[in-house]
Image (spheres, rainbow, N blue to C red):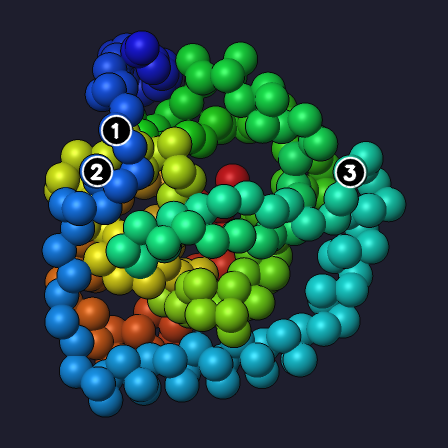
Amino acid sequence: MAVSDVRPEGPRIVWSAPLRRPLEAVVREITIVPRGRVSRALKRAIDLVGASAGMVMLAPVFAATYAAVKATSKGPALFVQDRVGVGGKRFKFYKFRTMVEDAEERKAELAHLNVIVGPAFKVTADPRVTSVGAFLRKYSLDELPQLWNVVRGDMSLVGPRPPTVDEVEQYSAKQAQRLAVMPGVTGLWQVSGRADIEDFERWIELDVEYAKTWSVWLDLAILAKTPFIVLQARGAR
């Protein structure tokens, strides 16, 4: 199956999707980088304190966003999907719904508009996005429910974005290394351009770089930079 996209500034690019492999086969290719007990404990402490405090302080924003989504479009306020985390562990991923209720069913008909050359999906000016959803995406408010994923231990505040199962089933051995660390709400990809980065290999390079060089200090630096990126709505779609 071939997925194509046309960019106004460049030639037509065609990406041929590899044969899908069972998730278990991809997981076997992941190399987990050992981390010290103290570093892991500090990261978890930062996650718990940061996510818990964020949920308390942003409770009015949670409530207002929930009400806005419910009032302006048909369907549940929360979007729940199976995603793949560290070591190939599957978990339920939460975010505020920003698309129409049947968005997943309509995904195939938009495949030719995918701007990501690789096993990921993103459409510029996606027609499935609601008016409220566009605002939420612009300022990343749709991601707030993932703080609950952090509290649960499914995600970290900082790490690669968690992919879907069907995306992971198309990963090469190199791409699978982004699953060597816990996925995050923000990360190197987000603070390096977010949706402006359409080269999937560059996206993978950033994620693998993080997986290899992770430290508490790097996490704190990314967390400090994230609010400025979000407020500027840089690369958000």
Q: What residue is drawn where x is 17% and y is 46%?
A: 28
Identify the disc placed on residue 235.
none
Q: Secondary structure at mark 3?
A: loop
- Label 1–label 3 contact, CB within 8 A: no
User: Disc 2 and disc 3: Cα gap in Å?
Assistant: 35 Å
Find residue 197 and report its horizontal and vertical position in percent. 32, 40
Quarter the N terminus occupies: top left
Q: Nearer the viewer, residue 153 or 108?
A: 153
The answer to whether residue 12 is seen in the rendering is yes
Kindly identify which residue carries mark 3. Answer: 75
Determine the residue positioned at 74% across, 57% down.
65
Q: Earlier in the sequence, mark 2 or mark 3?
A: 2
Residue with the most extreme right position: 71
Is 172 above or below relative to 47? above
Disc marking residue 25: 2
Circle 1 Cα neighbour tier, 10 Å, few/some/many (<14 / 14–19 / ≥20): some
Residue type at tag 2: Ala
Residue 138 x, y percent position in the rendering: 57, 48
The crowd level at tag 2 (other Cα within 10 Å; few <14, some 14-19, many 20+) is few
Q: Is residue 153 above or below residue 137?
A: below
Residues marked 2 and 1 touching at CB (< 8 Å):
yes
Circle 1 residue: 21
Q: Which residue does the image show at 31% across and 20% down from the upper left?
A: 9
* Badge 2 element: helix
Q: Pinpoint residue 59: horizontal percent, then vertical percent.
A: 72, 73
Mark nearer the viewer, 2 or 3 = 2
Q: Amino acid at mark 3?
A: Gly
Circle 3 crowding by C-alpha within 10 Å: few under 14, some 14–19, many from 20 = some
Task: Give the Cα separation between the discs numbered 2 and 1.
Answer: 6 Å
In front of the other: 198 or 19: 19
Splitting the image into 4 quarters, where does residue 17 fall?
Answer: top left
Q: Dot 1: what SS? A: loop
